[in-house]
Every structure is written in C-alpha cells, then in structure tokens.
Amino acid sequence: RPGSPVIFGTFAASMSMATGAPTFGTPEAGLAIYVMAELARRVGVPFRSGGQFTASKLPDAQAAYESAHTLLPTVQAGVNFVLHAAGWLEGGLALSFEKLILDGDQLGAMSVYGRGVDMTDNGQAMEAFLTNPPGQHFLGNGHTLKNFESAFWMSGLADNNSFEQWSDEGGKTSADRANERWKQMLSDYVPPELDESLDAQMLSFIADRKASMPDAIG
C-alpha cells in the first residue's frame, strides 16, 4: 500500500545451476536490484537490498569484482537501506577485517558517485574557462589552485605509485594495506570516557539479558 511503513527487500543473489550454491555479483542479481527497486517505488515503500556481496573466501579479485557488481546497481537503483555494506565474505558466512576496510574505502567513492555531476559554476569550472588565456594549461589557474585539494575523491588505500616505488616499499597488496590499517586503527583507539556507575549498570543489564536467553547450541 502507498505510504506503508513496510520495507520491501530482496537478496541480490543467484543460484549456480551446476551446483545449486548461491552466487553473488552476477549480472542477473544486479538486474534484479533494478527491477525490485522500481517495484518498491511503484507501491510506495522503502527498498532494502544490495551491499558488497561475494562468495569469495578471501579479500581477493573475486571479492572485489563481485562486490563492485553488487554495489554499483545498489547505488544506481536508489536502494533506501543497505544492510550488508562492508566486510562480507563466503556468502555472508564470514567477515573479514581487511575487506571491511576495503569496502569502507569504496563506500567513500560511492558517496561521491551518488551525488552526481556538480552543475554549479564552481563544479563546471566556469571561472577557469573565462579567465585562462588561450593555449595555456589550467594547472596554475586560480580556480584550479582553489579546488585541486578537494575536487576529487582520493582512495585511502589504493597505491598509485610507480611499480619501482611500490616494489621498494614492500610490494604490498590491497589486502596487506588493509590489514595494516585495521590493526593500526585498533591500536590507536581510545575508548570514550564513561561514568563507572553507568558502565556497571550496562554490564549488569547485558549479563541479565544473556542469562534470560541461553544459547541454543548443544
């Protein structure tokens, strides 16, 4: 019903006809996101889907491709709520800290991509076109100098150096760099100040809730 608070959702996965196992990042799954997003808008409800799915067991090329093939349709289809945005491996059976960091980097890129083309005078660099002398490059133009540090999204993980420099610095893969990043983040983390009495109350609440819902394993 239009205006209903129910969230319309779909799990963007396909099935391998050879094995029956779920696959992710396939063209069919991406097309399903587009179709279901349109259906959700047709009936007037929010749509939950997408993310950075992969069946890979490591943060490797398969994980990158499958995640990208899910994330782009997610953004382009206008999904309202994304639950599995980062860290997903092995069809959701595992979480990787390295992939969590790598996926977070890509989410930063998508936040820029999702804003679309900047049609303002500054975004279109009209000042540079109007003030730059004919036949001269734009690198020293005032507009360039004002915008070059913030005009483009820069990955916090990608290596854009020469092969020689990359090799001299250890030849690290994306997963290597992500591994260093999450370990450094944990090392640098400083817990926020918390009143000891409130902390004790929350710990007591957690213990009581756990005791009321014993594990069903065994």
Image: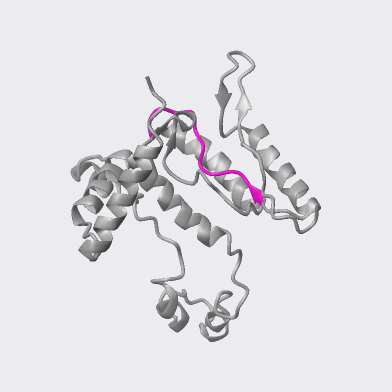
Give the answer, above or below, for where 38 lies relative to 23. below
Q: Position of residue 120 (x, y in %)?
A: 60, 78
Where are the magenta residues, as a range? Answer: 47-59
Image coordinates of residue 1 in percent, x first then y, are 80, 52
Q: Main secondary structure of the magenta part?
A: loop
Residue placed most toward the observer, 14 or 124: 14
**Residue 206 appearing in the image:** yes
Assess whether residue 151 is covered by the magenta stretch: no
Residue 119 in picture, x, y percent from top left? 63, 74
* Image location of residue 180, percent across then percent down: 24, 45
In the visual, does 18 lie left or right of 87? right
Q: Quadrant of residue 197?
A: bottom left
Count up the numbered dots. Answer: 0
What colour scheme was applied to this rendering of the protein? Answer: one colour
Depicted 66 relative to depicted 192: above or below: above
Please give left or right for residue 193 compared with residue 6 in the image.
left
Which residue appears at 32% of the width and 39% of the height?
A: 175
Q: Residue at x 38, y 30 (%)?
A: 215
Residue in view at x 33 percent, y 47 percent: 206
Q: Is residue 57 magenta?
A: yes
Viewer-side residue, 124 vs 50: 50
Q: Is residue 161 visible?
A: no
Image quarter of residue 148: bottom left
Quadrant of image for the C terminus: top left
Residue placed farthest to the bottom in the image?
131
